[in-house]
Image (cartoon, rainbow, N blue to C red):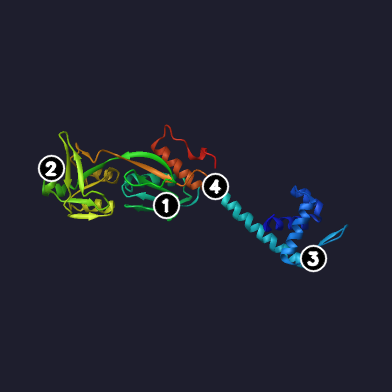
Amino acid sequence: MDQLQAMRVFVRVADAGGFRLAADQLGVSPTQVTRAIITLEKRLEMRLLNRTTRSMSVTDEGVDYLDSCREIIAKVDEIESRMGEMTRQPYGMLRVACAGSFAGAEFARLIAGYRLRQPRVELDVTAFDLCVDMAAESFDVCFVDSRGPAPSTMVRRPLTHFGEILVASERYLSQHGEPHAPTDLTRHRLLTFAGRDHPTWEISDAAATHRIATNGVFRTTSEAMLRAAALNHMGIILVSQSMVDDDIDSGSLKRVLPDCTIDGGSYEIAILYAGRSHLPARTRSFVDFVVQHYRPADAIPLSRFPA
């Protein structure tokens, strides 16, 4: 029996006025109650209870200790109640990491939709373009794409697929001409993502696959910065479609070579989290919401899995 349990026994004995009644209330044997009090007194090196075969009373030192025990037990019960509430009701801070390839308007709409359902959950979102260590940086969930490595210790739930597309501003294209074939790109300013393994773009048209060497006019490790550069008419970018869908709809950016296939097609977006056991309610509800958003027909809510 640990010290907190012994404290609870001592409080119950003092309130009940006897060992046997306290044992009955606790559902244990009188011997266990006696052993707990003796252990507690040895630990404190003081007598807490005066006891004879016919009566029992709390010593002066025991009265002081009893008040402290009540405060400690009440605080522990309060903490445990609050922690239990965290596993039942979504609230508190949810730390989310998101690959830059997905950290666009689509992701913003997803976050906004979740907040409408769970207004008590606060969101701390970090966008990354190269890599992130979920465990070391204490993220609850992480959105990744299939082009980068994922920790084998994490649960991975596939969500959707996005392709990369070529885009540029209307102003840039009017000044430099619109490409009509992949080889036309060699005459343009190509703005590139510095995190790529190969400094070339692989683009297929109906005739062949072309490897276009980028010219290094502008390189960055941020896909958000690539988008900003294109919006400021600096050149043509190759970027995740999810990042620029709204820009295309508004006319701020225009697709280049829309009939061509980029780098073998689409890539997968997935959500990672630490596991199904003992997750806070905010994490479970967020994963459920995200999976159901993309797969409403066959998604199994995480909350159905046993903790």
Q: Amino acid at mark 3?
A: Thr
First in sequence: mark 3 or mark 1?
A: 3
| Mark-to-mark CA distance, 3 and 1 | 54 Å
Q: Which residue is disc 4 drawn over?
A: 87
Q: Which residue is disc 1 drawn over?
A: 134
Answer yes or no: do the residues labelled 3 and 1 have beta carbons within 8 Å?
no
First in sequence: mark 2 or mark 4?
A: 4
Can you say whether 165 is above or below 57 in the image?
A: above
Q: Amino acid at mark 4?
A: Thr
* Residue 191 numbered mark, or none: none
Q: Amino acid at mark 1?
A: Met
| Mark-to-mark CA distance, 3 and 4 | 41 Å
Q: Residue furthest right?
A: 54
Answer yes or no: do the residues labelled 3 and 2 have beta carbons within 8 Å?
no
- Taking the image as shown, residue 68 lies to the left or right of residue 141, namely right
Q: Secondary structure at mark 3?
A: loop
Quadrant (top left/top right/bottom left/bottom right) for the C terminus: top right
Along the line of sight, which residue is nearer the eye, 83 or 4?
Answer: 4
Mark 2 neighbour class, 10 Å CA radius: few under 14, some 14 to 19, many 20 or more: few
